[in-house]
Image (cartoon, rainbow, N blue to C red):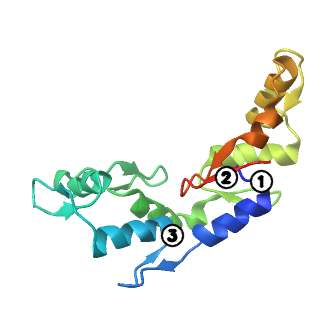
Amino acid sequence: FFRSRFARLKHQEKFHLGPFPCEICGRQFNDTGNRKRHVECTHGGKRKWTCFVCGKSVRERTTLREHLRIHSGEKPHLCSICGQSFRHSSSYRLHLRVHHDDKRYECDECGKTFIRHDHLTKHQMIHSGEKAHQCEECGKCFRRQDHLTVHYKSVHLGEKIWQKYKTAVHQCEVCKKEFKGR
């Protein structure tokens, strides 16, 4: 949701492509938002959430919720490849990178890899030219559902999709920073 692909890439490069080390303890983070939260929670700031089991205090409620999993044994993040489960999503993502990198699904056409088979299947439509999404109103076919939606709203409902985009505020999914398109 940036003005251009280049603007999005520059934003991601500056704020989300680490490593970003903590200047106090040296711990590395994948984006500036995570580093900022770490500094506030670990090296200062008011800790207002306290674990009723062990008394540990944390700054954010979500951190307390994750901490409580240590005591409950809950591991909600399940690997669909090997069945191992994890307390934290970050541990799960690391597990996928380390243990299943070689077991990804690879596109024979271009070499791009995917963790999930259904993502590979969807990607392969690009190469095959298959257009699986058909407009019920006029029969026109599209490779992607979102393209069909834009077509339907603009052609059959008369909505001015691109005018909305030009004035809409767009938000980065990672850091929630907002940008206005033109």
Q: Which residue is mark 3?
A: 32
Residue 76 seen anywhere in this rendered image of the structure: yes
Give residue 82's position: percent from left, percent from top. Answer: 44, 55
> Residue at position x 74%, y 41% from top?
167
Give residue 161's position: percent from left, percent from top. Answer: 80, 32
- Drawn side of residue 178 relative to residue 57, left or right: right
Q: Amino acid at mark 3?
A: Thr
> Residue at position x 59%, y 68% from top?
15
Q: Is residue 23 above or below residue 72?
A: below
Mark 2 secondary-structure assignment: strand
Instruction: Check if mark 1's residue and mark 3's residue have beta carbons within 8 Å.
Output: no
CA distance for labels 2 and 1: 8 Å
Count of numbered circles in the view: 3
Q: Is residue 76 above or below residue 35?
A: above
Give residue 31's position: percent from left, percent from top. Answer: 52, 68
N-terminal of the pair, mark 2 or mark 1, is 1
Q: Nearer the viewer, mark 2 or mark 3?
A: 2
Q: Label for residue 3?
A: 1
N-terminal of the pair, mark 2 or mark 3, is 3
Instruction: Check if mark 2's residue and mark 1's residue have beta carbons within 8 Å.
Output: yes
- Drawn side of residue 153 relative to residue 89, left or right: right
N-terminal of the pair, mark 1 or mark 3, is 1
**Would you identify the image quadrant in which residue 152 lies?**
top right
Pointer 1 local density, CA inside 10 Å: few below 14, some 14–19, many at least 20: some
Q: Which residue is mark 2?
A: 179
Mark 1 secondary-structure assignment: loop
Q: Amino acid at mark 1?
A: Arg
Closer to the camera in the image, 108 or 160? 160
